[in-house]
Amino acid sequence: MDYIREFDIRLDKEYYYAGEQVSGAVILDTIENFKLKTIRVILRGKVHVEWRILLSGDRRTVKEDQYFVDERQVIWGEQNSENTIPILPRGYHRFNFQFKLPESNLPCSFESKPCCIRYYIKVTVDIPYASPPQGMKYFTIIGPHIDCMDEQYLKPVVFEDDKSTCCWCCKKSTVSLRCVLERSAYVCKESLKLKATIDNRSDEEVALRVRLEQCCEFFIDRGVLGVSKDIKHLVFEYRGSQVKPNSRTKWDSSNSLVIPPMPTTLVGICRLAQIYYVLTVSLDTQKDADIVQLSFPITIATVPFRIPNSTTPPIIKYEHAASHVEGGQYIGPEFLLGQVYDGNDHNLRESVVLYRPVYVTVDTRSEEGPKK
């Protein structure tokens, strides 16, 4: 509108946890008096899944939504008033609003091409004789609430397996692998606590390989069976040195398996999306891969592990996800502020990103424990 100099939505912070209060304000700076019926504010959180499928030879788009939060307020005027429409005087105006997020587990904010989980404030300035201006402000939800100190995650997980090779029905040699995972839940930027014992009684050298995979599953309730999409990303891979024949060695991950920033584990909370992680430990030879393989479920949490007998809590930070995992490499076109190409490549600048979700990480120095 010509008589609105500024229309903005401001929040007290950019990320929230379930149960917290979202506080903000709508800013209107006007250059003349005008009739203003209402200012409506909506707090909404939803999951949207969408992709194209081949059905009877035709490419069709399938999509579905699920809402977690849908709250509304009128911060100026009355919603169903039939009285005289009030006049907003010219000048700078600040209209405050507050919403209470539900205490239930909320899925984390997430951005990918087939699925997005978004939370936002939408404001509509209802002017009776003109098209109502609208604005949206996106923010990040840190969730769901998963505490690394929960008893179920503190129990060490022990797996072992072996592989025997045979020659004319006689056992020739055996390769065994035993792994101990100190705990099964971690916050991003922590180091996985893994120990491995390798007993190589074969005639070939073997090498340890550790890899962490992100598994994303998206669903659409369509027809009897529905439609699904599975995506896997390699988070990291570690390769150890060769273990010589007829030898035994032990390996400790120490600080070599650091988890990069990425989305939280999301299982059993959203019916349209699941995100989980699998740690695979295997032994390879020069000829064959994964001759012995062990798999551990890994939970990416939002509340970090606290070092016993330490008075210093872990330092929490919030970072964008790594670009090589789902939820970190994709930015919706509506969040990219580009420019019109004028034929001169030297004038092109990088696009400005208006919004990207962040995820909980810890300062690596917090793992060192209290200084003596």
Image (spheres, rainbow, N blue to C red):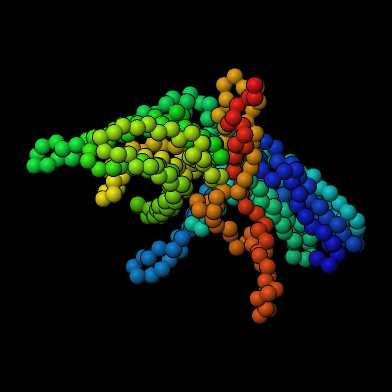
Q: Nearer the viewer, residue 342 or 6?
A: 342
Which quarter of the figure is the C terminus placed in? top right
Is the residue 172 above or below the residue 348 in the image?
above
121 or 212, nearer to the observer = 212
* Closer to the camera in the image, 360 or 239: 239
> From the viewer's perspective, is residue 96 above or below residue 29?
above
Q: Position of residue 53 (x, y in %)?
A: 40, 63
For image coordinates 14% across by 40% down, the residue present is 166
Quarter of image, res 292: top left
Residue at 45% across, 28% down: 182
**Horizontal placement of 78 versus 71: left or right?**
right
Specify the quadrant of the image occupied by residue 342: bottom right
Q: Position of residue 336 (x, y in %)?
A: 64, 62
- Is the N terminus in the top left, top right, bottom left or bottom right quadrant? bottom right
Q: Which residue is the extreme one toward the bottom?
A: 343
Residue 308, picture quadrant? top right
Q: In the image, what residue occupies the spot 69% across and 52% down? A: 137
Q: Is residue 68 visible?
A: no
Q: Residue 156, position in %: x, y?
A: 42, 26
Q: Residue at x 51, y 41 (%)?
A: 259
Q: Nearer the viewer, residue 144 or 83?
A: 144
Question: Taking 35 as reference, is 13 left or right?
Answer: left
Residue reaching furthest left? 168
Q: Is residue 360 visible?
A: yes
Q: Position of residue 297 (x, y in %)?
A: 41, 37
Above or below: residue 47 compared with residue 50:
above
User: How many numbered circles does the render carry?
Assistant: 0
